[in-house]
Amino acid sequence: MSTVSSLVLRKPVVLNKPQQAIRLLRGLYRETSCLFDEVARKQIQIRIRERFRECKDVKDEQRVTKLLKDGRRILSTLTRANNGDKWRLVYVLQHAYGAKGKLKHEMLKPLLKKAEPQEPLIPGRRRTAPPGPSPALVALMKAQVGKSIKVIEPVIPKETVSGKPFPRVRIANMKWRHQSMNLRRITPPLSSSDFERMEMLVMGFRKCVPPKRQYLTRDTRIGPKKQRPHRYTPRMQRRIFEYVLEQFTSMEYKDNPQGGKWVAKYSPVLQTLLRKEGAPEDFEGVNGKGEPEGLIGNPNAVTGKSAAERNRLKGKALEFANWLEAKRRDGKIPKEMGHFW
């Protein structure tokens, strides 16, 4: 049992397990209300409420002790995030937006339900049926190949070591195991509204709604300097949101006469920022190969890898310029920030 010092009785007050849970719940709500992002404040509070309701009927003492220990660990994470530990804050934002935790699995369910069932590799044995392909899930994996996953489909040998045909049971198991590994590593796509909001926050065209409760207590104001809370400046907030946005993609269904398809892509805001090289005007008079126009057979022309890199930067710069122009045309960029970039 935990103890709390009493100023009236001058002796420690012993709390039982239900009292510890109520005290822990209040502490979690207090720390959550201090987060500077309104979406994180709402999502984390919902998750805390759901988790406490799921565990309120647990009677096993060992299980209750473990749950209280996990709650104190989460409380410590929220406290350190509010104190200025940016990596703890990134961890909290990942759970709030769905990069980790229960929300991630809920956001992936619609993509998994669209999968087409496959016939078993061995007739009559349903467990040998490989995972069915989902066009939306395949598009999401293609966008994240080389970033969070290596390949979409596993490499299956045709023969065993002894030269016999590879067993079909093992083929099904390898495909299921590989897809499970990919699902653990990929991040679900954000909705269009959340994705656009995150872009505006990264660019500084939008600000978070500040919390009513500011994190500054008597215990952190005194004592060693390393224990004092750090303030999240607007620039630091943009960098934190940028790190979180790098893990998410946007999903869009493009319809054309040949047949519609799902397309997942990262935000153009991440491709061209002030600290990165490459602006549209830097590529004036450059052809598709990255070489100056009008120079044919010039031995000193830039070719090869340098030309490919220059052409890649040109495409990113133009994509960002088109994105910025579209947001300015829709009136989503404040007038005082119209010439910021």
Image (tube, helix red, strand yellow):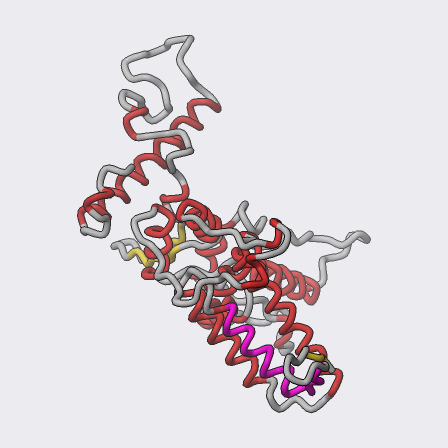
Determine whether 242 is above or below 113 in the image: above
The answer to whether residue 233 is seen in the rendering is yes
Q: Position of residue 189 (x, y in %)?
A: 43, 60
Quarter-of-image position of residue 10? bottom right
- The front one of 28 and 179 is 28
Segment tinted magenta in the rendering: 12-31
Residue ID at (35%, 51%): 199
Of 194 and 317, the residue lying toward us: 194
Total marks drawn? 0
Q: Position of residue 167 (x, y in %)?
A: 71, 63
Residue extending farthest top? 299
Which corner quadrant holds the C terminus? Answer: top left
The residue positioned 65% from the left and 68% from the top of the image is 73
The stretch drawn in magenta includes residue 25: yes
Q: Is residue 53 above or below residue 34?
A: below
Residue in the image at 53% along x and 57% along y: 89
Res. 143 in view: no
Q: What kind of secondary structure does the magenta stretch mostly adopt? A: helix
Q: Quadrant of residue 214?
A: bottom left
Residue 45 image offset from top left, x and y in percent: 48, 74
Horizontal side of residue 143 vs 315, given as left or right: right
Residue drawn at 45 percent across, 70 percent down: 43
Q: Is residue 156 magenta?
A: no
